[in-house]
Image (cartoon, rainbow, N blue to C red):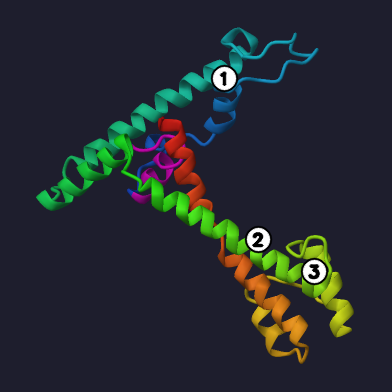
């Protein structure tokens, strides 16, 4: 089944469905209202969940929205039923479904090792940057900008990834150059993917 929140509308547009067969655009707010806990307030009587009785007009719209989803899905199925997929493509789809259902094996030692290396490298770079600049947090854009402006005597408008190489090329100061290089290296030591893998392993334990 297509992803209801993010894909059904796009699929309908891609297949050129008529307006009466397309997904309704009013659904997201209704989903939040009826399917997500709400904050208790004096106005809503301290409730944490919106029920149909709390707004029958919205509830009727919500039913219409869900009914239209089924209409859209059926129409998409009619079109896709006419498409003949190759055996290889079918196997790839099945593999994708199984991977999403069961996940994939993760090398625990590799993940933990990568995180340790990343943390050590970040620590070393931060210590070096602190020695060069005297800044408490050299990874702070505001602190680093202020320090750089004091060193080069010009305003530094951006420390974005695309702007740093130009700043390095245009400076004669070895201190400034090294600080900017460290800035570049710190941006390359992201371990977000490994953090996510480790979190997934912990949830599976």
Residue 31 found in image quarter: top right
Compare marks 1 and 3 and give the one earlier in the sequence: 1
Labels 3, 2: front one:
2
Residue 198 image point, x, y percent = 47, 43
- Secondary structure of the residue carrying numbered label 1: helix
Rendered view: 35 above or below 24: above
The residue at the point 22 percent across, 37 percent down is 78
Residue 47 left/right relative to 75: right
Residue 190 left/right relative to 12: right
Foreground pick, 155 / 69: 155
Residue 106 marker: none
Mark 3, residue position: 144
Mark 1, residue position: 34
The residue at the point 76 percent across, 81 percent down is 176
Labels 1, 3: front one:
3
Foreground pick, 18 / 124: 124
Foreground pick, 81 / 146: 146
Does 169 lie within the magenta span? no
Residue 166 image point, x, y percent = 68, 84
Please report contact status of discs 3 and 2: CB closer than 8 Å, yes or no. no
What segment carries the magenta color?
A: 2-14
Mark 2, residue position: 123
Residue 191 image point, x, y percent = 53, 55
Cα separation, mark 1 vs mark 3, equals: 46 Å
The quarter of the picture where the N terminus appears is: top left
Residue 55 found in image quarter: top right
Compare marks 2 and 1 and give the one earlier in the sequence: 1
Residue 5 image point, x, y percent = 46, 36
Cα separation, mark 2 vs mark 1, equals: 46 Å
Q: Is residue 47 visible?
A: yes
Crowd tier of the residue under label 3, counting other residues whose Cα lies within 10 Å: few below 14, some 14–19, many 20 or above:
many
Please report contact status of discs 2 and 1: CB closer than 8 Å, yes or no. no
């Amino acid at each position: 089944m297509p992803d209801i929140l993010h894909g059904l509308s796009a699929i309908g547009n891609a297949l050129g469905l008529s307006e009466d067969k397309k997904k309704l655009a009013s659904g997201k707010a209704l989903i939040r209202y009826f399917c997500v806990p709400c904050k208790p307030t004096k106005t809503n009587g301290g409730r944490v969940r919106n029920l149909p009785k709390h707004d029958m007009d919205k509830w009727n719209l919500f039913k219409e929205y869900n009914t239209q989803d089924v209409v859209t899905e059926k129409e998409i199925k009619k079109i896709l039923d006419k498409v003949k997929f190759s055996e290889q493509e079918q196997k790839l789809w099945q593999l994708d479904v199984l991977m999403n259902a069961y996940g994939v094996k993760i090398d625990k030692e590799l993940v933990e090792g990568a995180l340790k290396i990343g943390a050590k490298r970040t620590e070393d770079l931060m210590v070096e940057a602190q020695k060069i600049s005297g800044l408490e947090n050299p990874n702070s854009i505001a602190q680093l900008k202020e320090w750089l402006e004091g060193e080069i005597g010009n305003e530094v408008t951006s420390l974005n990834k695309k702007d740093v190489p130009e700043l390095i090329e245009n400076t004669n100061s070895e201190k400034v150059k090294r600080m900017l290089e460290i800035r570049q290296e710190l941006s390359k030591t992201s371990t977000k993917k490994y953090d996510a893998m480790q979190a997934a392993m912990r949830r599976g334990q």
